[in-house]
Amino acid sequence: MELERIFDDLRALVEDPSFPAVRRWLEANPQGKVVGHFQVFFPEEVAHAAGLLPVKIAGAGGTVQVRQADARIAAFVCSIVRSSLELALSGRLDFLSLMVVPNICDAARNGCGVWVRSFPQMRVETLYHPHNASSAHAVDYLVGEYRRIGRVIEELSGRPITEDALRASIALFNENRRLLREVYRIKRESPWLLSAVESYLLVRSAGLMPREEHNVLLRRVLELLPQRPAKKQDRIRVVFEGGFCEQPPLDMLAVIQNACYIVDDDLMIGLRWITEDVPLDGDPWRNLADSYLNRSSYSPVQRDPRKPKAEMLLRRIREAGAEAAIVAAAKMCEPGLEEQVHYSRALDGAGIPHLVMEFEETMTVFEQVGMEVETFAESLLFQFA
């Protein structure tokens, strides 16, 4: 079937460390340049408005053995920082003209310096999000940061980022976010039509190809999904929390989805960070900055007292109609492990069953995960029966 072929192709794309879609774009655009950006959030519209291709660098999963990176960065640092560096050191990111690393944590912030020393031929920049997102000056500050990164991009592209071009890019990305919201609506309302692995592939592929192509892909998938001959099964509905930066292996998600419906999650949240359309009227730079702060989701790496993360997780669970949660954290991820404690306490207080676990993108054995999730799910099915 066409849907299965699409998802097979997307899995091959996501798991190929050579970034084939990027290289196809460069073949079609010989003078084109690519901007890489690390997790969690980068305003891709700024790069797109200058004619550059923004690409999300989200680690190598288990496809690349980390060798060279361990000589430059400590082995106890989270896997995604090390494997992303390994991709570059092994020549797989030779297409990058610029790498932007948001200051989301100590590992990413200090890793940026390693990139600077390791790749003198590549421009490397840190994107500094406001430390106090609730400050009255946060939007002004972030506008300045976006414009600073924009000037770097203009130097690379050789063309100015006009307001009209930026608005056109915002409109394109608004459409992409709208389509992804529709994917998640189906995931919440009819999870038997769209598995957790499939929805993940749809989201992650957004950061690996031109958005124009991705919008066409999403529209076709959304057209085909209602025709899928799938039936509802007796499974518990859970929210998966903990995939905001380092990503769990696809096979781990497959093991979980075999036991329950994942009806919402924070996987690749940076590509879905802005939850509403970015306004097109007025100053597009300010609209982008304001949307990052005020029309957005949450994660352990954004410090915003207006967004109590535990309460927002409870709201995510309620709105998804979930009965339980899986609260995961990547190994060696300080922000994720800290928030895991707060999430667990809040879920206990609300009487919501939850399973706590750790993962690493390089995991290859999932028997223990499968046993834990199946036991958890079956105990709840028996309880709710």
Image (spheres, grey):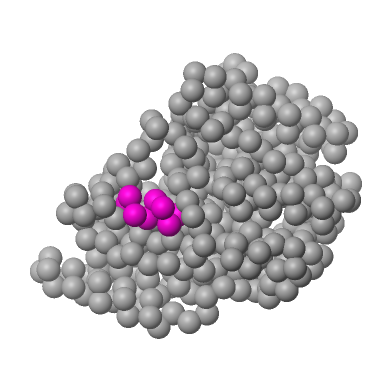
| Quadrant of the image containing the C terminus | bottom left
Q: Position of residue 328 (x, y in %)?
A: 40, 62
- The residue that appears at 39% across and 51% down in the rendered structure is 339
Give whichever of 4, 330 is nearer the camera: 330
Tell me: residue 360, above or below residue 351.
Answer: below
Q: Position of residue 48 (x, y in %)?
A: 71, 39
- The dominant secondary structure in magenta is helix
Q: Does residue 10 appear in the picture of this structure?
A: no
Tell me: residue 222, above or below residue 179.
Answer: below
**Res 232 quadrant in image:** bottom left
Magenta stretch, residue numbers: 336-343
- The residue that appears at 66% across and 64% down in the rendered structure is 74
Is residue 193 shown left or right of residue 383? right
- The residue that appears at 70% across and 69% down in the rendered structure is 70
How many labels, in total?
Answer: 0
- The residue that appears at 63% across and 51% down in the rendered structure is 108
Give yes or no for residue 359 being in the magenta stretch.
no
Give whichever of 78, 261 is nearer the camera: 78
Is residue 164 shown left or right of residue 91? left
Q: Position of residue 59 (x, y in %)?
A: 63, 62
Is residue 70 shown left or right of residue 80? right
Give whichever of 194, 109 is nearer the camera: 109
Give whichever of 172, 245 is nearer the camera: 245
Q: Does residue 273 appear in the picture of this structure?
A: yes
